[in-house]
């Protein structure tokens, strides 16, 4: 005989609570499988019930997670642009050296080996910031020494790309910090005698007790309608990008 399975993730817990609230609202108060005191905690409509607060905390995490993903996407796009401009800047300079328009020593202004035309390794944010700074200071020094300003791209274009990248990095950091803080809320609501884990355990106990006189198969079917899960039920899968991946603790 299959035994009941307590939910182990935020996704699984939220599905139990949503199902219990839906079933409770579809059932006359006198016929509910849970006592009024427990129903008052499971009802998702009032904004102050434990179940509502828990699901609201998960929604806040999901919203913050979307913002963090968007910020990371923006950083990645701006990083590619900055690295492309830096690479182009150095390539144009190397072409000028090859044509004889610039002396090979011009590479020295940008922290490059005058005798090596291999481009710097340009992969990361640190690479962009390091070589972008070399271009900014090097172009000032080279033009001050009488060199013609670089064009297509100019140092100003590289500088603007780095400015935009730095702004996006700040947004990304703030979004990540906000997400980390919000992730603590649903986890903190789980344990303890009044926590969500105990609430779900009470739901399981009361529902199964309510249907105790029915045959085992029928009892489980009635209990499933209230959100109770059993070992032979399909495992709940995490939703991609969902906050529900955290916390594996559970009441027993």
Image (cartoon, rainbow, N blue to C red):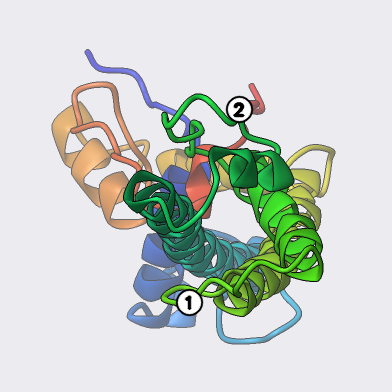
Furthest toward the top, the residue is: 1
Q: Is residue 145 above or below residue 191?
A: below
Furthest toward the front, the residue is: 100
Could you tell whether 211 is left or right of 56 in the image? left
Residue 94 location in percent, x, y?
A: 42, 47
Q: Residues within 10 Å of mark 2 (few under 14, many from 20)?
A: some
Q: CA distance from mark 1 to mark 2?
A: 22 Å
Can residue 247 be seen from the camera position used here? Answer: yes
Residue 136 location in percent, x, y?
A: 73, 63
Residue 28 location in percent, x, y?
A: 40, 82
Front residue of 132 and 173:
132
Q: Who's the residue at 46% across and 73% down the image?
A: 153
Q: Which mark is residue 151?
A: 1
Choose top left, top right, bottom left or bottom right for residue 57. bottom right
Front residue of 28 and 23:
23
Q: Which mark is residue 251?
A: none
Q: Who's the residue at 44% across and 35% down the image?
A: 119
Q: How many marks?
A: 2
Q: Who's the residue at 62% across and 34% down the image?
A: 112
Where's the N terminus, which quadrant?
A: top left
Front residue of 58 and 77:
77
Where's the C terminus, which quadrant?
A: top right
Q: Tag 2 or tag 1, which sits nearer the N-term?
A: 2
Q: Residues within 10 Å of mark 1 (few under 14, many from 20)?
A: few
Q: Which mark is residue 113?
A: 2
Q: What is the secondary structure assignment of the residue under circle 1?
A: loop
Front residue of 250 and 21:
250
Q: Who's the residue at 29% across and 39% down the image?
A: 237
Can residue 202 be seen from the camera position used here? Answer: no
Q: Is residue 41 above or below residue 88?
A: below
Choose top left, top right, bottom left or bottom right for residue 211. top left
Q: What is the secondary structure assignment of the residue under circle 2?
A: loop
């Amino acid at each position: 005989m299959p035994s009941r399975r307590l939910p182990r993730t935020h996704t699984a817990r939220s599905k139990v609570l949503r199902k219990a609230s839906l079933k409770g609202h579809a059932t006359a108060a006198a016929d509910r499988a849970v006592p009024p005191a427990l129903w008052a905690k499971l009802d998702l409509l009032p904004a102050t019930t434990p179940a509502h607060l828990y699901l609201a905390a998960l929604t806040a995490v999901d919203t913050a997670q979307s913002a963090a993903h968007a910020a990371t996407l923006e950083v990645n796009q701006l990083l590619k642009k900055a690295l492309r401009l830096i690479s182009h800047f150095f390539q144009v300079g190397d072409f000028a050296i090859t044509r004889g328009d610039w002396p090979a020593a011009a590479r020295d202004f940008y922290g490059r080996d005058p005798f090596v035309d291999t481009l710097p390794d340009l992969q990361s944010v640190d690479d962009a910031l390091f070589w972008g700074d070399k271009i900014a200071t090097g172009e000032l020094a080279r033009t001050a020494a009488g060199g013609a300003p670089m064009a297509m791209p100019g140092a100003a274009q590289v500088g603007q790309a780095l400015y935009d990248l730095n702004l996006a990095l700040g947004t990304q950091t703030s979004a990540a910090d906000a997400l980390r803080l919000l992730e603590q809320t649903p986890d903190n609501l789980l344990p303890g005698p009044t926590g969500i884990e105990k609430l779900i355990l009470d739901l399981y106990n009361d529902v199964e007790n309510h249907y105790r006189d029915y045959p085992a198969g029928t009892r489980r079917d009635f209990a499933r309608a209230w959100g109770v899960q059993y070992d032979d039920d399909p495992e709940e899968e995490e939703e991609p990008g969902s906050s529900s991946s955290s916390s594996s603790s559970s009441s027993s």
